[in-house]
Image: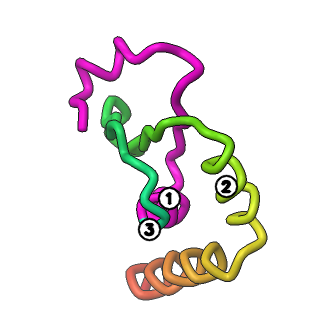
């Protein structure tokens, strides 16, 4: 995995970037390679994967999937837990 200085040199168009932790976890579960984690923004990391047709299919299916609902519910529970 590359560090943040190496991220600047990645060629455009060959990579998919996301800040969604649930989606990133799902992509790792499906064995897509995590290329880098960009922590330039201290409030939000960006996960970088190789772009492919297969990756785009998994991403398209993710938005209406049970997996997304699962991650959303974890986030909801954490918010309730720490907001009290």
Q: Secondary structure at mark 2?
A: helix
Give the quadrant of residue 42. top left
Drawn side of residue 9 relative to residue 12, left or right: left
* Residue 20, magenta (yes or no): yes
> Residue 20 at x, y = what percent?
53, 54
Q: Check residue 82 for magenta coloring.
A: no
Question: Which residue carries the number 2 mark?
Answer: 59
Q: Position of residue 38 (x, y in %)?
A: 34, 34
Mark toward the start of the polypeptide (1 vs 2): 1
Helix or strand or loop: what does disc 3 sit on? Answer: helix
Q: Is residue 2 above or below residue 62?
A: above
Q: CA distance from mark 1 to mark 3?
A: 5 Å
**N-term-proximal mark, 3 vs 2:** 3
Mark seen at residue 46: none
Residue corresponding to mark 3:
29
Which picture quadrant has residue 53? top right
User: Which of the labelled discs sits on residue 27, or is there none?
Assistant: 1
Mark 3 nearby-residue class (10 Å; few <14, some 14–19, many ≥20): few
The residue positioned 35% from the left and 12% from the top of the image is: 9
Q: Are marks 1 and 2 in contact (CB under 8 Å)?
A: yes
Say if 79 sits above or below 28 in the image: below
On the rendered image, what quadrant is the N terminus found in? top left
Compared to residue 3, the image places residue 64 above or below, namely: below
Q: Residue 13 at x, y = what percent?
A: 59, 20
């Amino acid at each position: 995995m590359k560090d943040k200085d190496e991220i600047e040199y990645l060629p455009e168009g060959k990579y998919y970037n996301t800040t969604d932790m649930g989606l990133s976890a799902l992509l790792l579960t499906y064995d897509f390679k995590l290329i880098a984690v960009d922590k330039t923004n201290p409030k939000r990391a960006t996960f970088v994967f190789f772009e492919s047709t297969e990756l785009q299919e998994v991403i398209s299916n993710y938005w209406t999937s049970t997996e997304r609902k699962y991650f959303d519910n974890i986030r909801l529970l954490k918010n309730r837990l720490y907001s009290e």
